[in-house]
Amino acid sequence: MTAKAMLCRCEDVTLDEVMEALDAGHHDIESVKRYTGFGTGWCQGKQCVLACARLLAQVTGRAPEMPITPRPPLHPVPLGVLASLGGDEEG
Amino acid sequence: MPRVVVIGAGILGLATAYNLAKRGVKDVLVVDRAYLCGGASGRNGGGVRAQFSSETNIRLMRESIEICRDFATEMKINVWFRQGGYLFLTRTAARARDLEENVALQNRCGLPTRMLDPSELHRIVPELSSEGVRAASFNPGDGVVFPWPFIWGYARAAKDLGVTVRPFTEVVGFETRGGRVTGVRLRPTRLSPLDATDEVLPAGDPYTEACDDVVLCAGAWSPKIAALLGLALPNKPHRHEICSTEPLKPWLGPLVADLTDGLYFSQSMRGEIVGGVAVEPVPEGVNQQSSRRFLTTYARALVRAIPTMAGVRVLRQWAGCYDLTPDGSPIVGRVAEPSNLTLACGFMGHGFMMAPVMGRLLAEHVVTGQTSPLFARWGLDRFARGELEHENMIIG
């Protein structure tokens, strides 16, 4: 892969930007997410989290970590649909 | 050279450490139970405003907004700061009177805040439904930032000045002698795998770091840490949830906040509509989990306020904790015992926006040991004295 390879296509995060985060000492996936912004766009990490987790494991020599904490909803949902739901119960 | 241990690497801890180092206190250690941006500093809506109901908050926030405006230049990092103003509105007569009084006070403090008539309201946010709106106020100088780079900016600048920032390190106890803290007991942590609770697990043996001063900036975790010193704090964690939509082209100027139902929303420089709403009751204690109830409540409130938002999709939701005090004002300054402990907590959901100025004031307080009128007013002993200072412009 070249340094300009796109790891997160939604937020335009490149390989060298993730490498820079690792070089800056961010060796856990939640910190790398917040330092680079990967996984916060349209796909919410569905396309990029594996590549970032693998890179992290390669660079640190540690076993791959859990994925980033998933943020609901699973897929983008229109506000109008959500507004029409009940859902007053906790959960 | 005194050694300062700062507990909590949120924006307030990092801003304090940065300002201590700038004043020559280079031996500063900032610890955090998890990763940076893991607490409220990485989970808030990024609002920065000077529209408040107490003169103290108004004047502090005027200064904080100036620091935000200059932050990118000073810290060499883009924090996506945008001054689109804050538009407060209310649907009750009582709140309308509060709003008018607050605007008069803000004007006396030099803010250009003004009450909006319906036509001006429509001009600033044409998409906003004015149904039932009794009054609205607008300060064009308020704005929004993207919180994450703000944290990285302070962390990097503090490190460049010699500060040590140590994430994944929790406080498990203190060593005290003669009414002073002499050491902080710390333990390495790691994230708990595959659960969404943001709990941490022990990942090593406890050890002690000696200290001459301790600053407690742990937000919603502060009461639990203070309890390790036998100190009872009156503040309580209170979960607040936020969500973010798909990015849209710029259309929304101000952050809109409805004081009636706690709805607020703004458009970030990334184009997303970021917002929240008051939801009660919330689970006890520190809880950073998302609920479906929030999402449906928020969607109903937002679609009522901006009907055209019905077709816009929510990408993600998350939660963080406000750190609430009984009177709505923060708890800052040294305590009687241990005499070298400085508190900086209870910021009521606006700790992020206040940290740029509070970090400077806290550093001065720690360096000089002097108590300013502000720190006297916001000290922990006000609860024993019964001299409370109320703030009524709390969102959510």
Image: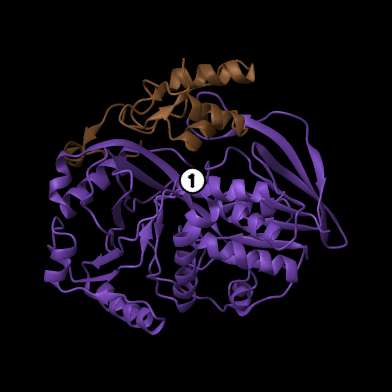
Chain colours: A brown, B purple
Asked if A62 appears above or below B198 in the picture, the reply is above
Residue B369 image position (x, y, % from top left) = 74, 71
Return the residue found at the far bottom: B108
- Left or right, residue B311 beside residue B360: left
Rendered image quadrant of residue B349: bottom left
Tell me if residue B22 can be seen. Answer: yes
Chain letter of disc 1?
Answer: B
Residue B323 image position (x, y, % from top left) = 51, 56
Asked if A7 appears above or below B45 in the picture, the reply is above
Badge 1: residue crowd in 10 Å (few <14, some 14–19, many ≥20): many
- Left or right, residue B110 beside residue B4: left
Instruction: Compare residues B81 and B265 and report the one nearer the observer.
Output: B81
Question: How many circles with numbers are drawn on the protein?
Answer: 1
Tell me if residue B334 can be seen. Answer: no
Instruction: Compare residues B53 and B285 and report the one nearer the observer.
Output: B53
Three-letter code, disc 1 = Pro
Q: Quadrant of the C terminus of chain A?
A: top left
Residue B62 image position (x, y, % from top left) = 45, 71
Residue at 40%, 23% in the rendered image: A6
Residue at 49%, 30% in the rendered image: A17
Return the residue found at the far right: B178
Residue wearing tag 1: B149
Asked if A24 appears above or below B234 in the picture, the reply is above
Residue at 54%, 53% in the rendered image: B75
Residue at 54%, 57% in the rendered image: B74
SS for tag 1?
helix
Residue B189 image position (x, y, % from top left) = 66, 33
